[in-house]
Image (cartoon, rainbow, N blue to C red):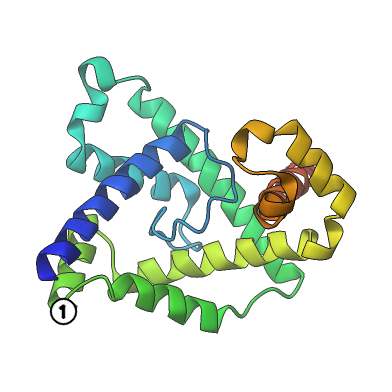
């Protein structure tokens, strides 16, 4: 059991590193917040300082990404992209709080405990944080921001906004994604369409916020 948990954590570490690069390259939308360890930096810090810390951490952990065949993006471009991403997140959190979405305490506790539960002891968890170069407070702050933005997305588009006709149309347009007929896949189809509409709503809101 202990060895299995260690393998799971190693796998998580790989996923986190890869996910960070994917986010940087722009192939994951703003709603990929369920990946709770996407970043670890407080909303109060400047976006520039945050991007610098993220890039420095990535260079220390994965120097090969900046060399040879893996070097598909320059360090400066990486910093600029991360800074822009953080600025977007700051705007969304600020707007969510303006709308009264400010108390994700229960979700925050659950998310934090879920991460911590993946370790056999408090010492192992502290070592994980040390390896990431972050504090428990910073981790909680970023988890809180993720939850707030997720809640903002939910407030923009609810499950009731997805009609049966829309879901069926989405299924027909994306049949290759589903191995069964609509009646068997309808719950997954509705969930996928809801995620898509929420992502689009967030992108639309963000564009308005940036234009003001």
Task: Place residue 204 in its image quadrant.
Answer: top right
Q: Please give the name of the residue rendered at 24% of the width and 56% of the height, measured from the top-left corner.
A: 132
Residue lying at the far top in this picture: please name it. Answer: 69
Percent of width and height locating residue 120: 16, 76
Placement of 55 over or under 157, stated as above or below: above
Percent of width and height locating residue 74: 36, 22
Residue lying at the far left in this picture: please name it. Answer: 3
Placement of 151 over or under 174, stated as above or below: below
Residue 198 visible to an observer of this rendering: no
Percent of width and height locating residue 51: 41, 44
* Viewer-proximal residue among 56 and 2: 2
Percent of width and height locating residue 147: 56, 67
Task: Place residue 173 in its image quadrant.
Answer: top right
Horizontal arrangement in the rendering, residue 203 relative to residue 178 (left or right): right
Q: Please give the name of the residue rendered at 25% of the width and 28% of the height, measured from the top-left corner.
A: 65
Mark 1: secondary structure: loop
Q: Please give the name of the residue rendered at 46% of the width and 30% of the height, measured from the top-left corner.
A: 25
Count residues near mark 1 (Cα–Cα under 10 Å), then give few for <14, some for 14-19, many for 20+: few
Reading the image, the residue beneath label 1 is 121
Q: Quadrant of the N terminus?
A: bottom left
Horizontal arrangement in the rendering, residue 38 relative to residue 211 (left or right): left
* Viewer-proximal residue among 125 and 12: 12
Residue 65 visible to an observer of this rendering: yes
Task: Place residue 159 in its image quadrant.
Answer: bottom right
């Amino acid at each position: 059991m202990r060895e299995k948990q260690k393998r799971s954590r190693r796998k998580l570490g790989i996923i986190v590193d890869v996910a960070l690069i994917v986010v940087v390259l722009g192939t994951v939308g703003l709603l990929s917040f369920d990946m709770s360890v996407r970043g670890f930096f407080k909303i109060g810090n400047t976006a520039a300082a945050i991007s610098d810390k993220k890039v420095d951490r990535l260079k220390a952990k994965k120097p090969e990404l900046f060399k040879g065949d893996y070097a598909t993006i320059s360090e400066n471009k990486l910093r600029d992209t991360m800074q822009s991403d953080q600025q977007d997140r700051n705007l969304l959190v600020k707007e969510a709080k303006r709308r009264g979405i400010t108390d994700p305490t229960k979700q925050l506790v659950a998310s934090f405990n879920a991460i911590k539960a993946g370790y056999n002891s408090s010492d192992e968890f502290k070592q994980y944080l040390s390896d990431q170069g972050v504090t428990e407070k910073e981790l909680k702050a970023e988890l809180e921001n993720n939850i707030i933005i997720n809640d903002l997305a939910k407030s923009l588009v609810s499950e009731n906004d997805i009609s049966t006709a829309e879901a069926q149309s989405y299924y027909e347009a994306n049949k290759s994604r589903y191995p069964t007929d609509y009646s068997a896949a309808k719950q997954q189809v509705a969930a996928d369409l809801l995620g898509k509409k929420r992502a689009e709503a967030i992108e639309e809101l963000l564009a308005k916020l940036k234009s003001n």
